[in-house]
């Protein structure tokens, strides 16, 4: 079989067109099935950065990232609850109790069954604040 330059060019063009068509189909498939929502978006990236900054002790940066995640529109309520929880921790640790209470209130509005972990609940700065807000909201629900 002789390699004709025209046949080689046709094969290359055919492969390029096929690749282009396949990429267009896969993008539409991902979009139409909602799989694009699973890729980390800016909000989720901000949440991860905020948690990482918090764990590194960089609370100012953490606060900015966590608030940015909420402002960017986290999709999952569980992610929103986590952002509010860490913001509450930051506010309580810095003596801003009213802001801490508000963050816990927002977390509990999103998930009334939300609880702190055992270690978190025992923390002297925010454990009592969370317990107080949770009791306050439980009373409101009973009315």
Image: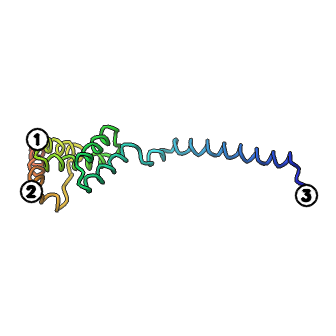
Label 2 sits on residue: 124
Distance in Å between CA atoms under marks 3 and 2: 82 Å
Residue 138 percent location from the top left of the image: 12, 46
Residue at horizontal 19%, vertical 59%? 117
Q: Quadrant of the N terminus?
A: bottom right
Q: Nearer the viewer, residue 114 or 99?
A: 99
Q: Quadrant of the C terminus?
A: top left
Distance in Å between CA atoms under marks 2 and 1: 16 Å
Residue 78 percent location from the top left of the image: 29, 49
Label 1 residue SS: helix
120 lies above or below 8: below
Q: Is residue 61 left or right of residue 18?
A: left
Q: Earlier in the sequence, mark 2 or mark 1?
A: 1
Residue at horizontal 30%, vertical 44%? 65
Q: Earlier in the sequence, mark 3 or mark 2?
A: 3
Label 1 sits on residue: 98
Residue 3 percent location from the top left of the image: 88, 53
Q: Is residue 30 left or right of residue 123?
A: right
Label 3 sits on residue: 1
Residue 18, located in which quarter of the rendered image? top right
Distance in Å between CA atoms under marks 1 and 3: 82 Å
Label 3 residue SS: loop
Label 2 residue SS: loop
Q: Badges 2 and 1: C-beta atoms under 8 Å apart? A: no
């Amino acid at each position: 079989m002789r390699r004709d330059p025209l046949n080689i060019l046709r094969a290359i063009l055919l492969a390029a067109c096929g690749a282009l068509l396949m990429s267009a189909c896969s993008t539409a498939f991902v979009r139409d099935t909602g799989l694009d929502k699973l890729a980390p978006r800016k909000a989720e990236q901000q949440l991860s950065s905020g948690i990482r900054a918090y764990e590194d002790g960089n609370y100012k940066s953490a606060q900015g990232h966590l608030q940015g995640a909420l402002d960017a529109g986290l999709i999952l309520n569980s992610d929103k609850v986590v952002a509010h929880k860490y913001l509450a921790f930051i506010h309580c640790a810095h003596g801003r109790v009213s802001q801490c209470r508000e963050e816990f209130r927002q977390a509990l509005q999103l998930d009334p069954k939300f609880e702190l972990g055992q270690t978190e609940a025992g923390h002297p700065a925010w454990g009592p604040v969370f317990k107080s807000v949770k009791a306050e909201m439980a009373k409101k629900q009973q009315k």
